[in-house]
């Protein structure tokens, strides 16, 4: 049994999947992420973990409270000897692969004195596989170059020969391009000498304790010859807590109110879920600012909230008074306004939240607004000490595209058990 295993992290995003593997004490050769804002978020989080490990978390708290700038934070972390794994802020492509591989291999040989890694994790951007996205523009979805990003994942597998890999995506990948994408992933892994079940495994984040119904297809494969390995049997521990319990300790906001800066928690004793999984030791939160909504939309929100909270029924767009209807299309997407269920768990938080909040309406009728960045992060199981970099829209995208950290941690735990058995 190794004390730690080495991971190569592809399509890292803001670090949801990464977070789970860090919590299970994996080491990282590097992280590859093309989006600058997401790469910055990941960098901030990696510094947090290293500072905490070395007993310098107060430095992170200073940045969290904005007592120092981000540049000062990174400089001071460097000054106390903090080093983090390499973050390669480039797009995986035919033209960049050679340089990226050369850079990673140099680090691998110089720092770790080996030629391979234990695990590769990641999931190519999934918008082109999304069933909703395909429904809106089938022709563009069928020719979207993101359909083929899995090939770069396979290329890195061929180069760094992991013992096990984790490839996550939306369930729409299974049927994308009439099933050819799924079949190509399976056959591609087989040609590289890996076993991968030809029956897809779809996991729900709620089974990992996440307060959200969020299905993801999770491929887990391993090198041929490890015949004793099987796809893990993941427990289904649906949370007993409700969305309301993880929202009601935050400051109440009207549309346009709040701030991205530090705000204290509301007074009151937090629930066990909040204390154990979400809240930090800094006494408050960041990223809790409500977007501005016009009064027409807020009127629609109140109708949607009242209908959902009183009868448990979703608002159909055609049920609105005529003076509130602005869309000519009255036949499709009639559920475009959706309230988060405060008495249970949420529907899936999506990156679309960056465009408008209509599908993620706060359940408190008195607030009549959409979710803030921090509220969306909490539903995704990101802890309050997790900072997201970039403008608000970029924060929403990072959160909506992420694997929930609690789900990622559960997956990482099983991967460690599999590696321990080799």
Image (cartoon, rainbow, N blue to C red):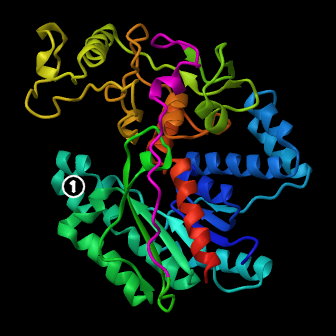
- Residue 232 included in the magenta stretch of the image: yes
Please state which of residues 190 and 98 is positioned toward the viewer in this rendering: 190
Task: Residue at the far left: name it.
Answer: 331
Question: Does residue 23 appear left or right of residue 320 in this picture?
Answer: right
Q: Position of residue 94 (x, y in %)?
A: 45, 75
Q: Quadrant of the C terminus?
A: bottom right
> In the figure, residue 7 lies in which quadrant?
bottom right
Residue depicted at x 17% and y 33% = 333
Name the chief secondary structure element in magenta.
loop
Residue depicted at x 41% and y 20% = 362
Residue on which disc 1 sits: 140
Q: Quadrant of the N terminus?
A: bottom right
Residue depicted at x 27% and y 64% = 174
Is 402 located above or below residue 86 in the figure? above
Query: Which segment is the magenta one?
Result: 229-257
Is residue 341 visible to us here?
yes
Residue depicted at x 53% and y 36% = 377
> In the figure, residue 63 lies in which quadrant?
top right
> In the figure, residue 124 lies in which quadrant?
bottom left
Q: Position of residue 217 (x, y in %)?
A: 36, 60
Task: Residue at the far right: name it.
Answer: 80
């Amino acid at each position: 049994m190794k004390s730690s295993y080495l991971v190569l992290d592809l399509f890292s995003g803001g670090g949801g999947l990464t977070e789970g593997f860090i919590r299970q004490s994996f080491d990282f050769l590097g992280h590859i992420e093309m989006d600058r804002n997401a790469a910055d978020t990941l960098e901030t989080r990696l510094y947090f973990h290293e500072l905490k490990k070395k007993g310098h978390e107060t430095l992170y708290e200073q940045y969290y409270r904005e007592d120092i700038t981000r540049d000062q934070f990174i400089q001071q972390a460097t000054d106390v000897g903090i080093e983090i794994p390499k973050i390669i802020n480039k797009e995986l492509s035919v033209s960049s692969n050679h340089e990226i591989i050369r850079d990673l291999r140099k680090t691998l040989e110089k720092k770790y004195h080996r030629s391979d890694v234990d695990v590769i994790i990641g999931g190519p951007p999934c918008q082109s596989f999304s069933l909703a996205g395909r429904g809106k523009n089938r022709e563009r979805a069928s020719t979207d170059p993101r359909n083929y990003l899995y090939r770069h994942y396979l290329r890195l597998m061929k180069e760094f020969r992991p013992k096990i890999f984790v490839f996550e995506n939306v369930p729409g990948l299974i049927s994308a391009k009439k099933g050819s994408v799924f079949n190509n992933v399976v056959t591609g892994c087989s040609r590289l000498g890996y076993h991968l079940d030809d029956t897809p495994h779809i996991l729900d984040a709620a089974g990992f304790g996440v307060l959200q119904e969020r299905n993801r297809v999770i491929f887990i494969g391993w090198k041929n010859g490890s015949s004793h390995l099987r796809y893990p049997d993941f427990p289904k521990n649906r949370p007993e807590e409700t969305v309301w319990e993880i929202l009601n300790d935050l400051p109440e906001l009207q549309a346009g109110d709040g701030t991205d800066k530090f705000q204290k928690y509301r007074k009151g004793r937090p629930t066990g879920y909040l204390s154990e999984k979400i809240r930090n030791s800094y006494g408050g939160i960041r990223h809790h600012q409500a977007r501005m909504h016009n009064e027409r939309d807020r009127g629609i929100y109140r109708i949607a909230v009242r209908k959902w909270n009183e009868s448990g029924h979703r608002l159909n767009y055609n049920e609105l008074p005529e003076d509130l209807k602005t869309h000519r299309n009255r036949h499709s997407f009639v559920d475009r306004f959706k309230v988060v269920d405060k008495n249970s768990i949420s529907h899936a938080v999506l990156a679309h939240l960056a465009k408008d909040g209509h599908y993620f309406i706060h359940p408190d009728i008195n607030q009549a607004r959409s979710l803030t960045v921090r509220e969306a992060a909490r539903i995704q199981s990101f802890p309050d000490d997790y900072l997201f970099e970039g403008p608000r829209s970029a924060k929403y995208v990072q959160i909506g595209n992420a694997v929930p950290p609690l789900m990622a941690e559960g997956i990482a735990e099983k991967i460690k058990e599999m590696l321990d058995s080799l």
